Image (cartoon, grey):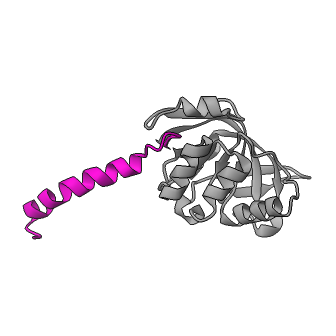
Amino acid sequence: MDLPLTEDAVRKLQVGDSVVLNGEFYTARDEAHSHALDHFQKNEPLPVDLNGAAVFHCGPIVKKLDGDKWELVAAGPTTSSRMNTLEPQFIESFKVRAIIGKGGMSKPTVEAMQKFGCVYLALTGGAALIAAKGVKQVKTVHWFELGMPEALWVLEADKFGPLTVAIDSHGNSLYENIDEIVSKQLPKIKQKLGLE
């Protein structure tokens, strides 16, 4: 899929779909989320346009080269639950269309995704070097004063993925489905293991 994403394109995605991204996307963890929302509340412009964007929950390892150039070394996903308190407002305020991370997100975030048209794309944890291969270049960085992992990195994707639609814009979640299956199977498993 080409970035930025439209709401129509995102609404067509279903849980379990596989996605590969091309184009400009951004890293943002909790500090960058807070910083962006502070700007929004003060009516101050952001250095990037997040409307239609894919935001990657990632604290990348980036190597400084000559001049303003950077090289991405590793880009593993951060556990997304760190952003649970900020994400619903972030999605509503900036009309972000995709969140990339690991581990899923809270019910209020799922509801915001459903209301405003956003999906959660899961990336396998521990695949930081593989993920970095899907990044053509580091275009620039903003808010570096927050520190390397918390800064807002502007990346150029070239077949970034594959990513799995783990939460779609219709309120469906792989994580919820798994929880239901585990809950149903747990008594049988405990009985077999003699844990009851």
Left or right: 84 as drawn, with respect to 178: right
Left or right: 168 as drawn, with respect to 191: right
Residue 121 vertical placement versus 79 (above, below): above
In the image, residue 11 lies at what x, y percent? 56, 33
Classify residue 40 by image quadrant: bottom right
Classify residue 184 by image quadrant: bottom left
Q: Could one spot residue 3 in this view of the protein?
A: yes
Tell which residue pokes out farthest to the front in this image: 115
In the image, residue 2 lies at what x, y percent? 68, 30
Determine the residue positioned at 51% across, 54% down. 102
Is most of the magenta stretch helix, strand or loop?
helix
Residue 56 vertical placement versus 21 (above, below): below
Q: Quadrant of the C terminus?
A: bottom left
Tell which residue pokes out farthest to the bottom in this image: 196
The magenta segment: 167-196
In the image shown, does 195 or 158 lie closer to the viewer? 195
